[in-house]
Amino acid sequence: MTNKDVLLLALGNEIMAAKFYQKLADSTKNEDMKSVFERLARFEHMHEEKIKDIYLSEFPEMTVMNFNDREEFKGKTQFHDVGEVLSYGMEVEKNMEESYIKLAEMYAGEENEVIFKELAKEESYHTEILEEELQRIQGIHTWFDMSELNGMMED
């Protein structure tokens, strides 16, 4: 796979992820979940722009076709509950993080290495957002760091 192919694949993945999150935001009646999904969709759009910039800097003679009109989310679209949606989103984000780590390795020593490392870090953050939401709806989310309780609880 060429650099061009890899960048186009990453671009398509970001567009599909943004569409996935926007579709979830549009379909939920829960305002908290709507806000989370809209936020994630915005993050994915920002990633899309970063990848477009890399693509056009590497291949200035090319244009980026309008994926928004033809790319549809190709992942799972039927879920039984919100927990399943969040778990699936975490899986997608982890896969994207791994992809960006590989791209950073592919661009080792180049300016784009830093960008892909940052994208990987951001995808990890998206996973954390989804994980916190999952814990919140399962009732196990804590608002403090458990290590803060050292010495305050009996064994």
Image (cartoon, rainbow, N blue to C red):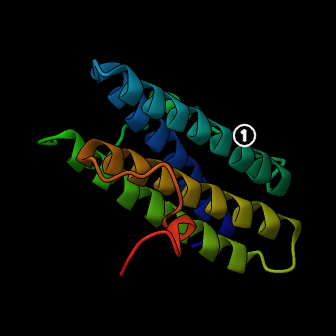
Q: Please tell me which residue is depicted at 36% across the width and 50% down the height of the picture.
A: 89
118 or 134, nearer to the observer: 134
Based on the displayed image, in which of its 4 quarters is residue 4 positioned? bottom right
Which quadrant of the rendered structure holds the C terminus? Answer: bottom left
The residue labelled by disc 1 is 63
- Where residue 138 appears, as percent x and y from the top left, is 24, 48
Q: Nearer the viewer, residue 148 or 22?
A: 148
Residue 44 location, x and y as percent? 57, 41
Q: Is there any visible trace of residue 70 in the rendered image?
A: no
Quadrant showing the N terminus = bottom right
Query: In the rendered image, which quarter is residue 91 located in?
Result: bottom left
Along the horizontal axis of the image, is 81 left or right of 68?
left
Q: Is residue 48 left or right of residue 93?
A: right
Mark 1 Cα within 10 Å, few/some/many (few <14, many 20+)? few
Q: Position of residue 147 (x, y in %)?
A: 54, 70
Amino acid at pointer 1: Thr
As drawn, which residue projects farthest toward the left? 80
One can see residue 33 in this view: yes
Residue at image coords 87%, 73%: 110
Report the residue at 43% width, 38% height from top: 71
Compared to residue 19, the image places residue 114 above or below, namely: below
Considering depth in this image, is 96 or 39 the residue closer to the camera?
A: 39
